[in-house]
Amino acid sequence: MLLRQTRNLTKPYAARFSSSLFSSTPSPPVVVKGTAAHIADVTGADDLVYTDSPVSSTVKPVMEPTLLQPRVVVYDGVCHLCHGGVKWVIRADKHRKIKFCCLQSKAAEPYLRLCGLDREYVLRRFLFVEGPGLYHQASTAALKVLSYLPLPYSALSSLLIIPRPLRDAVYDYVAKRRYDWFGKSKDCLVLEEKELLERFIDRDEMMGRS
């Protein structure tokens, strides 16, 4: 009976601890040495504790534990085509689920480091850090972003059933030619449309450069 009472007493505390990890209420920032604890927060975003997760063919693990935000798109901020896509997602994302970060900003560095990627690689294939230990690139990243948007846009994520090599072949073809077709800027294009900055985790850095 004593053992049963002890278990009953500990259940509420265990449940409270578990729910606090991914609570919908933002928690105070936790400073972890060597991490990007000072990255700008986005209103309504939760802190995310990365942990190890199973490996699949489209999802790669982030091994180093730290605090970062979920559902962040790291993209080529000087690319006109990429910036146009970001503007489209912001308009469609009525529930503000997706955040953004220019690849050229310092705020992108912890995301690249945790995913084991360098800037040159992400220039070719943009990065979407979805959740605990998960990131996607290229066509999979684009379709995963669409899955968070309201209907009918989220229905397009069903294209994930197409084999990834085929999807990525189309993605890479366009990506290699995007500057020639659409042009590029000398600096992150979001600086020209500051009303978009509220959706960027690197907005303070961008404002300091303007």
Image (cartoon, rainbow, N blue to C red):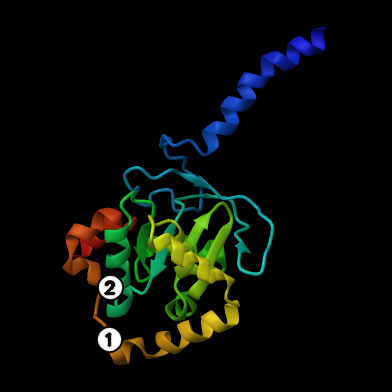
* Residue 88 visible in this rendered orientation of the protein: yes
Quarter occupied by residue 11: top right
* Residue 109 visible in this rendered orientation of the protein: no
Indicate the position of residue 153 as horizontal and vertical percent values: 39, 63
144 on left or right of 58: left
SS for dot 1: helix
SS for dot 2: helix
**What is the count of numbered marks?**
2
The crowd level at tag 1 (other Cα within 10 Å; few <14, some 14-19, many 20+) is: few
Vertically, is 50 above or below 126? above
Indicate the position of residue 35 as horizontal and vertical percent values: 49, 53
The residue at 48%/35% (across/down) is: 23
The residue at 68%/62% (across/down) is: 55
Dot label at residue 182? 1
Q: CA distance from mark 2 to mark 1?
A: 10 Å
Residues at circles 2 and 1 in contact by the CB criterion of under 8 Å:
yes
Q: Amino acid at mark 2?
A: Gly
Nearer the N terminus, badge 2 or badge 1?
2
The residue at 56%/83% (across/down) is: 166
Indicate the position of residue 21 as horizontal and vertical percent values: 54, 37
The residue at 32%/71% (across/down) is: 85
Q: Quadrant of the N terminus?
A: top right
Who is closer to the viewer here, 154 or 42?
A: 154
Q: Amino acid at mark 1?
A: Phe
164 on left or right of 23: right
Who is closer to the viewer here, 176 or 171?
A: 171
Vertically, is 16 above or below 27? above
Indicate the position of residue 22 as horizontal and vertical percent values: 51, 39
Q: Which residue is mark 2?
A: 84
